[in-house]
Amino acid sequence: MVGSLYIHIPFCLRKCPYCDFFSIPYDKDIEGRYIDALMRELMLRKDAIGTINTIFIGGGTPTVFDASSISRLLEFIVNNFGIDSDAEITLEANPSSVDGEKLRVLRDSGVNRISVGVQSFDDAELQSLGRLHNSATAVKALSIIKRYFANFSLDLIYGLEGQVVKGWIKTVRTAISFSPPHISAYELTPEAGTPLGRRVSRGETVIPHEDAIAIMYGAAAEMFANAGLNHYEISNFAAPGFQCRHNQNYWRRGLYAGIGAGAHSHLNMHGGTVRSSNASDLTQYLTAIENNSLPVHETTIINTLEALKEYVFLGLRTSDGISLKEAGIDSPGLTKLIENGLAEFNGAKFRLTRDGFLVSNMIIGQIIDQL
Ligand code: SF4
């Protein structure tokens, strides 16, 4: 039985050129039908869902939906499933699609955490990201969010075209001025297949050099630490007690059910676990659900070796680290990482330091190759 639900709302007002998530243009006419489909899928998966302790409504841009639609969905969940009294219920929001009334309705419907995609406080950077909001809209959205939610998070992105360290530090400083209990800071990845990825590979867009990226990462981590935000995952920082419980479940290889087009699940099956994904196609998704069948597109059985790789890969992204004993790793290479200040071992847990996080892909790749 799973206690975590991820609900995907794949609609956005406009596609950002760097985005490789499953998102499609918002269509007001489909909103009610999509919420009905989510409710049907929840019922189809009822046997796999236990007492719910976290819900994450992500996207896409869930706030393009009317607050009453989200409210109808949450009411349905409350009426049909058990929910912990202190369940964490997060909703992703876009600065350009929130207002006080919408946030009030969402809060009164049970949402108790908002994750807002600010990305930058620099108008030119926001424009290069193709975002619809500007800095003033983000500032206004944050001041409204703070009025309704004590628990909120800001997403920021660094490594943008034309971005310099000084500009990034200004964005970080502005973010901290809102005293957020949680910040996620992601390095921009020019994914192949996105307009940005194509422009970077053709040399038409130049992103900052890796040395500048390293300085940006270190500077932000230092500033967040000084603001009382602990570095609990490579890209995530939180005040004590404000870590995102939903994401912590992912990083600990916990089980969850993903509801909605393109959503992923990790479920118990056949004495082990499976990872599966729903069709990333709205028509396919709606057709399957409306015919009372699960829109599962792909299923992968996680064998013992895969489970171990996931444990190492996900665990080393967090400040909790991994148990070398549990992972069955005993390698002289690890001592070298510790000597070079890239990792630490406290006798029980092995974890990466801030410098180690910077080169985590390389380190984790090397460790996984030995499994
Ligand atoms: S708003 Fe978010 S999900 Fe939508 S296109 Fe932009 S980055 Fe992708």
Image (cartoon, rainbow, N blue to C red):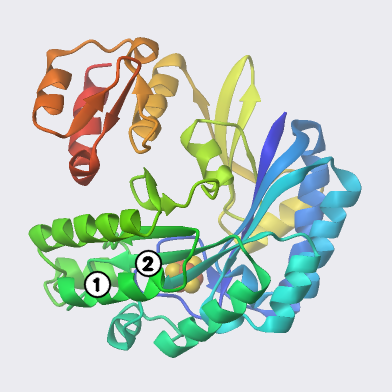
Residue 173 lies left or right of residue 163; in this view the side is right
**Residue under the image location 49 percent in, 31 percent down:** 252
Disc 1: CA contacts within 10 A as few (<14), some (14-19) or many (>=20): many
Is 349 placed above or below 177 here? above
> Is the N terminus in the top left, top right, bottom left or bottom right quadrant?
top right
Amino acid type of the residue that numbered disc 2 sits on in the rendered structure? Leu
The residue beneath circle 1 is 168
In this view of the protein, which residue sits in the foreground, 87 or 194?
87
Is 107 placed above or below 26 here? above
**Residue under the image location 45 percent in, 75 percent down:** 15
Q: Secondary structure at mark 2?
A: strand
Residue 121 lies left or right of residue 24; in this view the side is left
In this view of the protein, which residue sits in the foreground, 113 or 201?
113
**Residue under the image location 57 percent in, 53 percent down:** 262
- Who comes first in sequence, dot 1 or dot 2? 2
Count numbered badges in the picture: 2
Residue 53 lies left or right of residue 116; in this view the side is right
| Residue 231 position in % (x across, y down) | 36, 47
In this view of the protein, which residue sits in the foreground, 190 or 5?
5
Quadrant housing residue 332: top left
The residue beneath circle 2 is 156
Gap between marks 1 and 2 measured at Cα: 10 Å
